[in-house]
Image: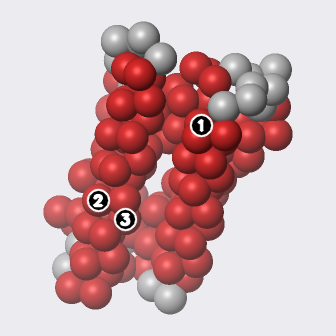
Amino acid sequence: MVTEIEMLNCIHQNADMAKDSLEHILPMSADSAFTKELEKQKAEYARAYQKSEALLRERNFEQGKDAPAVTKMMSGVMAKLKNLADPSTEKLAEMVFQGNNMGISDLSKCINGYQGEDKEVLNLAKKLLAQEEKNAEAMKKFL
């Protein structure tokens, strides 16, 4: 069973991890169209992060739980290593695509387990899930 607070933290962590991952990958991009797409996605994740933070505060929680620092650090290290082995746009797009799919999986689990009645929270989760799916689709043209 997933509560409103757990759902908001799921959204918060997903958006945080996505923003952080894109911050690592953006400097590696040499393709202007790809960079533009990543910047657009990063802005979308930042909005979801801020919205989940605001909803948590409205519900008297000081701050959402960010993605674990170790996970973010390892993601950055892996991105750099993979980029050293293959600095192509295709490889970067593959990494982003894989991240989108992890987000889709995590959000789907939270949504499917949600037992709360707060429609605003559920709608935010569904909106972020749709965004993840759209972002994964956008990466396909760079693969």
Structural distance between the alpha carbons of marks 2 and 3: 5 Å
Structural distance between the alpha carbons of marks 3 and 1: 21 Å
| Residue 86 rendering spot, x and y as whole percentages | 37, 70
Mark toward the viewer: 3 or 1: 1
Secondary structure under badge 2? helix
Task: Name which of mark 1 and mark 2 comes first in the sequence.
Answer: 2
Q: Which numbered circle lies on residue 41?
A: 3
Measuring 31% from the left and 69% from the top, which residue is drawn there?
40
Mark 2, Cα crowd under 10 Å, few <14 / some 14-19 / many 20+, is: few
Instruction: Say which quarter of the image contains residue 111.
Output: top right
Mark 3 belongs to which amino acid? Gln
| Residue 5 rendering spot, x and y as whole percentages | 58, 20
Q: Which numbered circle lies on residue 43?
A: 2
Instruction: Say which quarter of the image contains residue 4.
Output: top right
Measuring 50% from the left and 79% from the top, which residue is drawn there?
138
The answer to whether the residue labelled 2 contacts the one labelled 3, judged by CB atoms less than 8 Å apart, is: yes
Q: Quadrant of the N terminus?
A: top right
Measuring 46% from the left and 62% from the top, which residue is drawn there?
96
Mark 1, Cα crowd under 10 Å, few <14 / some 14-19 / many 20+, is: many
Mark 3, Cα crowd under 10 Å, few <14 / some 14-19 / many 20+, is: many
